[in-house]
Image (cartoon, grey):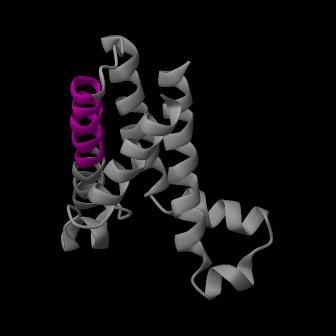
């Protein structure tokens, strides 16, 4: 069941990060003030909604019996971690600590960002499959 859950959560991540993320969210989700936080939280909420819908579909179609409270906790975890990572400073801090300034200057931050998101999704899938 882990593989199916992980796949659906990853699909939800891709859907929320690419076709369902607005230009405004992408441009402002790391910004300060109300505009930045609104963009960030609405983007994170998109992740929560899409992942919840995919988990519900997986439960219905594949006969899973996911307990409601852990499933809610998992999608809230996804939303919270996604919003945190997308503030951008955590990725920049990691790359600074890991001495990856050269890679950061050549587009590496996007890869570190996506790896952090996949780690959070994997932890959610492990939690739900356990």
**In this view, which residue lies farthest toward the front?**
62
Q: Quadrant of the C terminus?
A: top right
Q: On screen, 23 above or below 76?
A: below
Which sits in the foreground, 32 or 24? 24
Q: Residue 98 appears at what percent x and percent y?
A: 79, 65
Which sits in the foreground, 80 or 116? 116
Is residue 100 highlighted in magenta? no
Which sits in the foreground, 108 or 94? 108
Instruction: Give the quadrant of residue 91.
Output: bottom right
**In this view, which residue lies farthest toward the right?**
99
Q: Residue 28 appears at what percent x and percent y?
A: 29, 68
**Main secondary structure found in the magenta portion:** helix
Q: How many marks?
A: 0
Instruction: Give the quadrant of residue 62.
Output: top left
Q: Residue at point 49% right, 63% down?
A: 88
Q: Left or right of 77: which side holds 57?
A: left
Q: Magenta span covers which residues?
A: 45-61
Q: Residue 59 appears at what percent x and percent y?
A: 28, 24
Q: Residue at point 58% right, 46% down?
A: 119
Q: Residue at point 73% right, 68% down?
A: 96
Is residue 60 highlighted in magenta? yes
Which sits in the foreground, 22 or 13? 13
Q: Residue 27 appears at what percent x and percent y?
A: 29, 73
Q: Residue at point 69% right, 82% down?
A: 103
Q: On screen, 57 above or below 101?
A: above
Instruction: Give the quadrant of residue 21.
Output: bottom left
Q: Left or right of 19: which side holds 127?
A: right
Q: Left or right of 108: which side holds 68?
A: left
């Amino acid at each position: 069941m882990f593989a199916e859950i992980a796949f659906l959560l990853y699909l939800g991540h891709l859907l929320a990060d690419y076709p369902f993320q607005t230009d405004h969210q992408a441009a402002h989700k790391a910004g300060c003030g109300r505009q930045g936080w609104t963009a960030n939280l609405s983007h994170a909420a998109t992740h929560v909604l899409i992942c919840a819908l995919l988990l519900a579909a997986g439960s219905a179609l594949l006969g899973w019996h996911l307990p409601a409270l852990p499933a809610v906790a998992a999608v809230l975890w996804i939303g919270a971690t996604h919003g945190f990572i997308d503030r951008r400073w955590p990725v920049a801090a990691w790359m600074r600590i890991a001495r990856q300034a050269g890679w950061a200057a050549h587009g590496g931050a996007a890869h570190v960002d996506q790896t952090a998101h996949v780690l959070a999704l994997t932890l959610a899938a492990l939690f739900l499959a356990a």
